[in-house]
Amino acid sequence: MAVETALPQIKGVKDVPYEELFVSGHRTCQGCESALVMRHMVKASGPRTIVLGSTGCMYVANTTYYTTPWVVPWMHTQLGASGSAALGTAAGLKVLMRKGKLKNEKINVIAFCGDGGGADMGLGAISATLTHKDYNCLVLLYDNESYANTDIQLSSMTPYGAVTTFSPSGEKKRLMHTRWKKNVPGMLAAGHPESRYIAAGCAAYAVDLMNKIRKALELGGPTFVHTLDPCPKGWDYHPQYSQELGHLAVECGIWPLYEVIDGMCNLTGPTRQIAEGRKKRKPVIEYLRRQGRFAHFADEDIEHFQAEVDKMWTDWLIPGVIPFTIPAKDQNILKIDKKPLHESKPA
Amino acid sequence: MAIETKSRESSEVETEVLATGCEAIAEAIRLADVDVMAAYPIRPYDGVMQAAAKLIANGKMDVEYIVADGEHSQFEIVKHACAVGSRVFVGSSGVGWFYAFEAIAVTAGLRLPVVAICGNRALDDPGAFGTEHNDSLAVRDLGWLLPWAETAQEALDLALMAWRIGEDKRVSLPVAIGLDGAFLTHSQHIVKIPSQAAVNKFLPKFDLGDRLLHPDNPITIAPQVDQDWLMEIRRQNDNAMRQALTVIREAHADYKRIFGRGGDNPFLDEYMTEDAEVVVIGQGTLSLPMKVAIRRLRKEGHKIGLVRLKWFRPFPTEEIVKSLTRFKAVGVIDRDYSFGSPFYGGVLYNEIRSALYSQAKRPVIVGFVAGLGGREIEQNMATEIFEKTEAAAKGGPSAGDVCHWIGVRE
């Protein structure tokens, strides 16, 4: 079905909308990449958008009373409620338009959450929302890899070994935090086959990110975009290096960029180049040594980190996306001609 | 679903049916043209969600019916649907209500007029399905209006009033109707279902006005206000709750004018109190065994009566003072507990004592905890409650400084 696209794909930096819908008035830290995500997000979605903001940096630092930076309508939601906020808002708009109580038009609904709100507390509600295919809404998870607003406490998205206020490096324990980061976009893509769009992006690749936001909103239904946001305060580096660290996270293969559209996975940006062998994956030490949160790492910690990242590229079914595969002896399963049952005619 | 009865004549204003409390509420949802509701299973409140689902499946109403992944999501979904202008309904029971607690708190803070039922159920642990009021009462300080229903008819009437009162711009607060689990949620009564035309006369369309979240009205809702503004905003909520008393009176008077139900007093329902010297007061369905006991004991010469409290929040202090100062003693029956409270009394007991403290002429007020976990209040227990209250009437004010647990195996 040919649908007129209100949000065409952006061809390059010069094609990015000039209009700013996330403006001054916030008090995010210098070098805050998550604030850039907010800016790109509404730039991409345009003014006919309602934004719901879950508790976290982008709530507390962004919406001091009387100094809101949001040009579009914005509402707070609870830490674990981004999925429910998106769903409730989308359902409300849908029914009011159906009943003629509200003018029928396309209004984008975006609910954002941090890694704490999205990957820890609110994961269940996001999962539920991604199964409600009748409602058009996007959940955006901005992942700065800690509860950065409340004091840099570790979340399930804090990388292995990183120092946070809940995982200091001490004399007895060099590493307090030894859990591997959750693979949230991969998990959501694998578990929600009816969600038409699930993607991983990074504000360091701004046009790629804005296009992902637009695709999510254009395809409709419940969709999900996850961004990795370098955080000077939580990661302990000089604010001028935020973009560079975003690039490094992707180039080292730690944060793969991809999108899953209607069940088809596309690797994007440098991730695609690495997967196709056109670009060499950088060693993780280049990324780790730029950040204070890994300053306590011994050689063995870096080796472990590198080995785990290597697995994403050598062992996973889809590099960086699906963290399991099938045994070598069963590889032919992938090549078997699969006939759908629903198309077979009864004898 | 509700069975239409043929035995009594139905007027153009209403139809008579046999319905449970939950089914009666489902009819109110249909009549109020609710836009969004969110369901999650827990006994006993969810009878209303089952009844509503049937109405939707059979094309009797058009509602976005969302089955949520938990009570927190349930209450968040309707909160956000409400913010974009939807009339909404939700509900829960017992620990489910507590699972939603964060969302319940912010809904009141946001001044969003969500209408809910709390099918009152004992909190875990240990488990019990039956009535206890601690679930509803836990939100008493947050800005939710809390009425309690006695019958399925009153459940329906209160629901229709709840949207009107909660959505009134002077109030703009959520309402949670207390329905005693099993006794009311699942027992059938004859219920008069009003016609749509009559309901339309009573219930205006929901209009959030300049608080609507919409691209044409690009406001920022619930920013971080800190100590600079929080007290002023809390004070506004306090004012809204004060206004609610007036708005309830208006809605009640209008409801009575259109439907002829509700009695003279929106807040209290009095039974055989005209010549009473001693009364008991309580909420919800416990009035039924108490009324039976009153009729029985009056034959033996006891001048006793019942005052049933219909609205716990806002607390009708003026009406309570006016009513209860007429009696020598008042027995307060709490279907709840408040461990470690003054005189170890229930929640209602201490609220009522507080309301009457400054009165020169005040009754002895004695506390009872009864019927927890859905335990039946039997006639011997009702007799004991009246006997103890009458005994306290003969003592000084301190004769009421006690809370009796009724029908407990020691």
Image (cartoon, grey):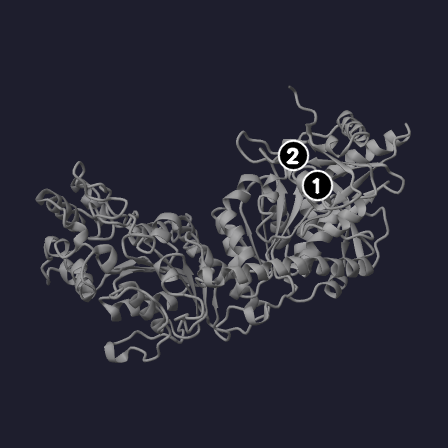
Q: Position of residue A176 (x, y in %)?
A: 22, 41
What is the number of callouts on the image?
2
Judged left or right of residue B381, residue A265 is: left
- Mark 2 — residue? B345
Label pair 1/2, CB-CB below 8 angstroms? yes
Q: Is residue B65 above or below residue B205?
A: above
Identify whether B219 is placed above or below B306: below
Q: Few, some or many C-alpha atoms within 10 Å of disc 1 (few <14, some 14-19, many ≥20)?
A: many
Is residue B204 in sight in this rendering? yes
Earlier sequence position, callout 1 versus callout 2? 2
Say which of B143 and B219 sits in front.
B143
Q: Secondary structure at mark 1?
A: helix
Q: Amino acid at mark 2?
A: Gly
Tell me if I can see residue B112 in this picture: no
User: Viewer-nearest of labels 1 and 2?
Assistant: 1
Same chain? Circles 1 and 2: yes
Q: Quadrant of residue B172?
A: bottom right
- Judged from this view, the residue extending furthest toward the top is B410
Q: In the visual, does A23 lie left or right of B102?
A: left
Residue designated by label 1: B353
Residue under the image location 80 percent in, 46 percent down: B323
What chain letter is assigned to the residue under label 2?
Answer: B
B404 over B190 or under it: above or below: above
